[in-house]
Image: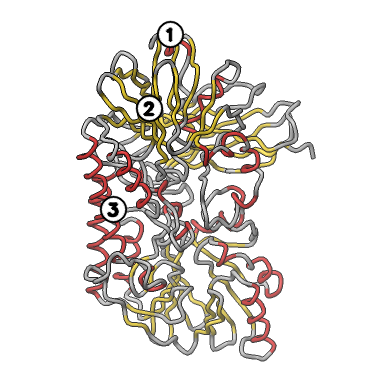
Amino acid sequence: MFSIVKINEDIGFFKGGVNTGIVKSGRKAVLIDCCDMLSAPYMKKAGIDTVDMVLFTQHRRPNTAGIYSFLESETRIVVPHKEQELFKNVERYWNDPGYRWHLYNFPPSTQILPYSVPVSETVGNGSMVKWEGFAIRVLETPGATEGSLSYIIERDNAKICFCGDLIYDGGRLWDLYSLQRGENVSDYHGFLGNRKKLVASLYKILDEDVDMLVPSRGDAIYNPHETAACLIERLDKLYLNYYSISALNYYKPDYFKEFKDGSSRMEPAAMLKLPDFIIDTGFRSRLVVSGTGDGLLIDCGAVEVVRCIGNMIRKGRVKSIDKCWVTHYHDDHVDYLDRLEKEFRPEIISTKAVEEILKYPERFYLPCLSSATVNRVKGLPHGCRWKWNEFVLTALHFPGQTFYHGGLLVEGYGKKILFAGDSFSPTGIDDYCCGNRNFSGSSRGFRYCIDLIKKYKPDYIINQHQPKPFVYTDEQLVYMDKALMKRYQILEELLPWEHPDFGLDEWWVRVYPYEQEILPGSEAIVNLQFTNHGSQSAKISVQPVLPVGWKTLDSTTITIPEGTCGSNEMDSGSPDISMKICIPVPTNAENKLYIIPFRINWNGKYLGQFRHMLINVKNS
């Protein structure tokens, strides 16, 4: 699990959760990044008694968590100038609700250190770090994070670059969700948005004519130009594929300016007029009106919808709101469900995948998450079919824009209407954000949704953000399905995992509940939930990293079966497996927020502290 790779007599790296660079002079060393698995015996094995300095490529925990072992020594801590606050003032991040709720802009990510560390020095582009005859040059190389750095060292006629998470060996990337950034849109809409910065950073390093790249993960790269060219080509292929069936072609026609001729883009679907029994209330909601005067509302994310409903009832256009179907958990679809419930008392229904988020949003960490709680909601199983007045309704698990998403098929007056939430548009699919968990492969994610459209053949598809319904031809459904098949092949080449969704699905490991309030002297009970996207079972070991003074817990190991479905709340497919961990909170624990990271080992490969939970200790 942990080894030492020697590049020459003075330079090498520890190969652990991340690659930690070693620059030696006698029994002293400088480290580049700092895996938390480093220990005195391993240092001794590498011939190191003293670490004079640690240089960081970025702020994220797998690269930085080992630094706490050096805080009592005289080790200098050198960090990227643009990310210094994410080392020396992390409490500001953790206590800011703007990084917890209604997230549409994501930097700096959730992989922040749990406690601040003293920063000795900051460096940026063009800085030079001199130590024991070494001159270590610094380049700003954003991509995986906004302030990432690379360090170039020349020794024995070789130029070696420690380049962080810019690349993985074989022309691949460790994950894609790190590139989620917006360009003239919110980060939420910016799938692969940081790829341009990453590519520019690669070219910047290649211009230095380096002989070797040492990335944060994977093996050292001895053919930098060929490997980088391979990665850039794969990213270009993936983005062209993404563009070809993207809903952004509908919402923002000029967004993909680099593809001027539009030759690979799907022809838009025909748009239609709403059936007479459906009213557009505005603000992402629709109202199905029965001949009885009862109403079935779809979503309620704005106060204007509640007011509109009240006006219609007062004017006699609608007798009551009998039900409200919630397509998905995003704040712009749920923020005013509680007020709707108080004023009109509808039965609120959703799929099982959506139900628990509506009831307990604090248990989750997801994009666009609302803090509004909806207690009285009923989650229906996939395929549940029932009669509502003159209509027949069918609840569908519809994992499109987000995994936690439901479709509602409404049949009546000789028409079939599919309320698809935010999952499709006339130009294709709404898969903007890795945090939404858009799975790839056969019968998963959008391909599963396309299969449902083929099966039920709706006459109208309604996206809550679009004024007009639309309908796909058979040819358009085949076009999207083939594009997604091709995308899966590209992802297989690009991501170094058994299944590409490990690098695409940001939440294949989840902490549940993500946040909880605990009294001192009591016990925090948490479940680590695992989605195994692969075709083989996997052995998982997990150990919480607890604050100083708390009882140390041993690691826990379980086996996860192959091909789990993404949730343990689903009524179909192989459910995810949870690992229960009980964390005793000391009686003398202070009243404050504690961040509890978890060390995670997957099938013998240590992945670092890339997940955490929040414990709010409160006396009353």
The residue identified by callout 2 is 19
Q: CA distance from mark 1 to mark 3?
A: 51 Å
Residue 332 locus on image (x, y percent): 56, 66
Residue occupying the far right of the picture: 620
Quadrant of the image occupied by residue 252 = bottom left
Q: CA distance from mark 2 to mark 3?
A: 31 Å
- Asked whether residue 502 is in view, the answer is no
- Left or right relative to 89: residue 76: left
Mark 2 Cα shell of 10 Å, populated few (<14), some (14-19), many (≥20): many
Quadrant of the image occupied by residue 89 = top right
Q: Which amino acid does the dot numbered 2 rest on?
A: Asn
Q: Which amino acid does the dot numbered 3 rest on?
A: Gly
Q: Nearer the viewer, mark 1 or mark 3?
A: 1
The residue identified by callout 1 is 27
Callout 2 secondary element? strand
Residue at left offset 46%, top offset 61%: 405
Compared with 331, 343 (above or below) is: below
Q: Which amino acid does the dot numbered 1 rest on?
A: Arg
Q: CA distance from mark 2 to mark 1?
A: 20 Å
Callout 1 secondary element? loop
- Left or right relative to 356: residue 227: left
Residue at left offset 24%, top offset 74%: 474
- Left or right relative to 161: residue 420: right
- Left or right relative to 96: residue 397: left
The residue identified by callout 3 is 441
Residue at left offset 46%, top offset 63%: 185
